[in-house]
Image (cartoon, rainbow, N blue to C red):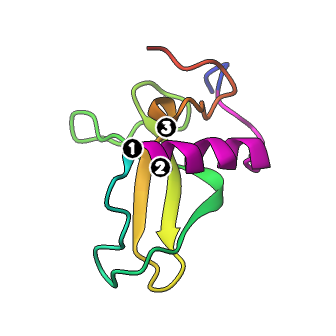
Amino acid sequence: MAEDTPTTFKKLSQEEKDKIDTWITTHWSKRNCPLCTHIDWHTANYLVATLTIVEGKIPAVGESPGHYGFALVFCGFCGFSVLLHANILGLSPYGKTPNK
């Protein structure tokens, strides 16, 4: 497993959730849910990851390229969900300062 791969999962702190909320307020001009039109967004307690399929194969945990961290933001009324890239938000799933 790669050296920077987490072996335990850390719940997002209130400060990190506030950072996500600030980013959304600053960058998301029309925040109505595209499914139900409510404005009732919430951030999940953990970052989520997607897998990258490379040459028809899914890399093992920790292999690079393989995993991208995202904040999961969802509508509290209907459940519609949006993934926001952790590095763009200034968060890193591995506890390091994101590369720019």
**What span is in magenta?**
5-26
Horizontal side of 91 relative to 26 (left or right) equals right
Q: Is residue 41 above or below residue 50?
A: below
Q: Secondary structure at mark 2?
A: helix
Mark 2, residue position: 24
The secondary element bearing badge 3 is classed as loop
Label 2: how many Cα within 10 Å (few below 14, some 14–19, many 20+):
some
When asked about the image quadrant of residue 93, the answer is top right
Q: Which residue is mark 1?
A: 27
Residue type marked 2: Ile
Q: Is residue 8 above or below residue 28?
A: above
Q: Is residue 12 part of the magenta span, yes or no?
A: yes
Tell me where residue 89 appears, x and y as whole percent. Answer: 51, 35
Q: Which residue is mark 3?
A: 60
Q: Nearer the viewer, residue 94 or 53?
A: 94
Q: Position of residue 43 (x, y in %)?
A: 60, 60
Three-letter amino acid code at the position of disc 1: His
| Visible residue check, residue 35 | yes
User: Does dot 1 land on a helix, a strand or a loop?
Assistant: helix
- Above-or-below relation of 53 to 96: below
Mark 1–mark 3 distance (CA, rounded to whole Å): 34 Å
Amino acid type for the residue under numbered disc 3:
Ala
**Residue 71 sits inside the magenta stretch:** no
What residue do we see at 48% from left, 50% from top?
25
Classify residue 21 as left or right of residue 56. Answer: right
Disc 3 crowd, CA 10 A, few/some/many (<14, 14-19, 20+) = few
Q: Earlier in the sequence, mark 2 or mark 3?
A: 2
Q: Residue at x 42, y 53 (%)?
A: 83
- Mark 2 and mark 3 residues within 8 Å of each other at the beta carbon: no
Residue 54, how many percent across, how many down? Answer: 27, 34
